[in-house]
Amino acid sequence: MATKGHDYHLVDPSPWPIIGAFSALVMTGGLVLYMHDVTPWVAPIGLLMVLYTMFVWWRDVVKEAVVRKDHTPVVQLGLRYGMVLFIASEVMFFVAWFWAYYNAALYPTEAMGDVWPPKGVATFDPWDLPFLNTLILLLSSTTVTWAHHALRHGDYKGLKQGLWITVILGALFSCVQAFEYSHAAFGFRDGIYSSTFFMATGFHGFHVLVGTIFLTVCLVRSYKNHFTPTHHFGLEAAAWYWHFVDVVWIFLFISIYWWGEGVPAVH
């Protein structure tokens, strides 16, 4: 076998990118079928496929980093650039939902009664459950930062404690949002307000779920001693993703829950 004369990592052929893309197609297609009352079973199957792909793909990446020692400093730099670009693409994803919301809110049509929220829509009190969830996410942002800084200083106990609290807070956020949805005075197909509300907050909730899984994986890895103060990109990427989710929620809270309670129309 030839000796590698460089610090870069040439990845092995992997089936997971194409399988992951197909799984995402099944999940999103299933959501469309569910919204049109065709079948509720395709979306859960797609979700399970996505979760399985996440598991095996992360397993392979962890093996590259921990067992094979392929993640040299220059490889880690490339991974950081990749994570930054991924988060940038996620930003543009949410820009689409904010654009739809602001377009409808600032330029309400006659069908909406020329007001926003449309006539007859009972919005949530922003200082009730939405504010509670804001506090939960802001607190979780501090605990994941605590975990990261603890690891950088070799404090593995602080790392585990910070991750445990962050994961619990992430799960609590999801529970509060599920409770909020169950008490909504409007359904998904009850007009433009409900559609933009559920799409924006729902996709954010999905990202919180993904972030919670991401951090749970990091928590498990912390017990397996996979991280060192100088080699822990997996945790760093999870922390970046979690901070992104927090920032998006702040914009959601301000735009949809607070500002969106009553918006003067632009004529």
Image (cartoon, rainbow, N blue to C red):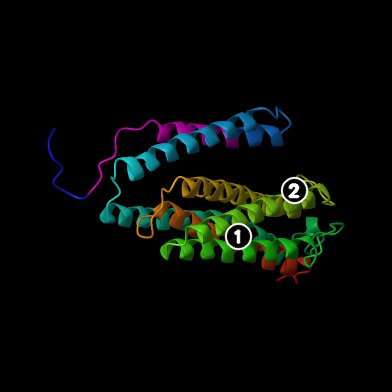
Q: Quadrant of the C terminus?
A: bottom right
How many badges with numbers are in the image? 2
Question: Would you say residue 21 sits in the magenta stretch?
Answer: yes
Q: Earlier in the sequence, mark 1 or mark 2?
A: 1
* Residue linked to disc 2: 178
For residue 99, which numbered disc appears in the image?
A: 1
Q: Secondary structure at mark 1?
A: helix
Q: What residue lies at 28% left-to-right and 45% top-to-bottom?
A: 70
Q: Is residue 96 magenta?
A: no
Q: Start and end of the magenta stretch?
A: 8-28
Q: Is residue 174 left or right of residue 9?
A: right
| Quadrant of the drawing holding the N terminus | top left
Badge 1 vs badge 2, beta-carbon distance below 8 Å: no
Eye-nearest disc, 1 or 2: 2
Residue 113 x %, y %: 82, 60
Which image quarter: residue 43?
Answer: top right
Q: How crowded is the residue under tag 1: few (<14 C-alpha within 10 Å), some, or many (20+)?
A: few
Looking at the image, the residue that sits furthest to the right is: 120
Q: Residue at x 57, y 47 (%)?
A: 210
> Which SS does the magenta portion mostly show?
helix
* Residue type, numbered disc 2: Ala
Q: CA distance from mark 1 to mark 2?
A: 25 Å
What residue is drawn where x is 23% and y is 48%? 8
User: Dot 2: few (<14), some (14–19), or many (≥20) neighbours within 10 Å?
Assistant: few
Give me the residue at 70% from left, 27% from top.
39
